[in-house]
Image: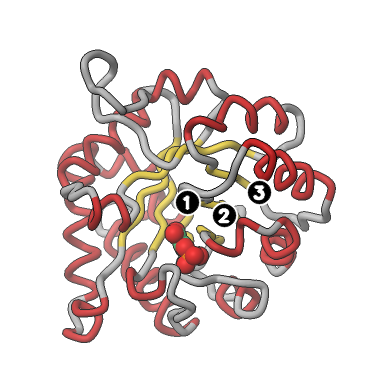
Amino acid sequence: MRSSLIAGNWKMNGSLASVTELVEGIKAGDRGNAELAVCPPAVFLMKVGGMLADSGISLGAQNVCDHESGAYTGEVSAAMLEECGCRYAIVGHSERRSLYLESDQLVAARFAMAQAGGLTPILCVGETLYEHEQGVTEAVVAKQIDAVLESSGIGGFANAVIAYEPVWAIGTGLVASPDTAQGVHEFIRGKLATNDARIAQQVRILYGGSMNPGNAAELLAQPDIDGGLIGGASLKADDFLAIAQAV
Ligand code: PEP
């Protein structure tokens, strides 16, 4: 039985004052039975990590360096994130892939380095609108996962989370239908099962893309959707908690 995870990706939003208020709101509310995680901007990790101590809410980073340490200006290592209290690190978010040209291979290297540093990577995969319209979603997602399989093997997915995030649904208000999302999640699990059925059954696959309190319950009711990676709606404590309660 897989436990549900509702993770908030705050992206480059907020200030010290607003993230403090957001964490206080999340801590004070009813979070249902799901595991919650929040991924603040890197500069707020220490602050948020301190506030979350003993709360049962996990901390995650929005990215992680593909090297252990050294001359990588602007990057943050897995060991540093671990020291801040992180349990998770998002890798391969579509904004990193499209705006910062992160390749499948770089994402796979970040995935491996997160694990080597004791973090659980949340590997984002998903197709663009053009690819969606061309009907090549499965091929795109398969290629993104194959890059990780090539570098980390199927064993890498024993301690990882996957987030299926159709790029056309991120921040657009468009959401994949529960049937469409379930189909892709089932495809991902089936693909992993050809390598190892047990790991495929255990790995949590989140849906991300304009999930909100109004559409969460139907998406989260699908058999292969094990939670959500939430952008915009995670910036309001009440909305984030309402999604968690929909699990
Ligand atoms: C995201 O950026 O991972 C995301 C899912 O964003 P939103 O919920 O705003 O679509």
Give amino acid for label 1.
Answer: Gln
Q: Residue at x 77, y 58 (%)?
A: 32
* Depicted 181 relative to depicted 157: above or below: below
Q: Secondary structure at mark 1?
A: helix
Give amino acid for label 2.
Answer: Arg
Query: Residue 240: where, in percent of width, then height?
Result: 67, 60
Q: Residue at x 30, y 38 (%)?
A: 111
Q: Nearer the viewer, mark 3 or mark 1?
A: 3
- Does the residue at mark 3 contact the one at mark 1 (Cβ under 8 Å)? no
N-terminal label among 3 and 1: 3
- Residue 2, labelled with which disc? 2
Front in this rendered view, residue 182 or 13: 13
- Residue 202, labelled with which disc? 1
- Does the residue at mark 2 contact the one at mark 3 (Cβ under 8 Å)? no
Front in this rendered view, residue 130 or 120: 130
Q: Which residue is mark 3?
A: 35
| Residue 127 located left or right of residue 38 | left
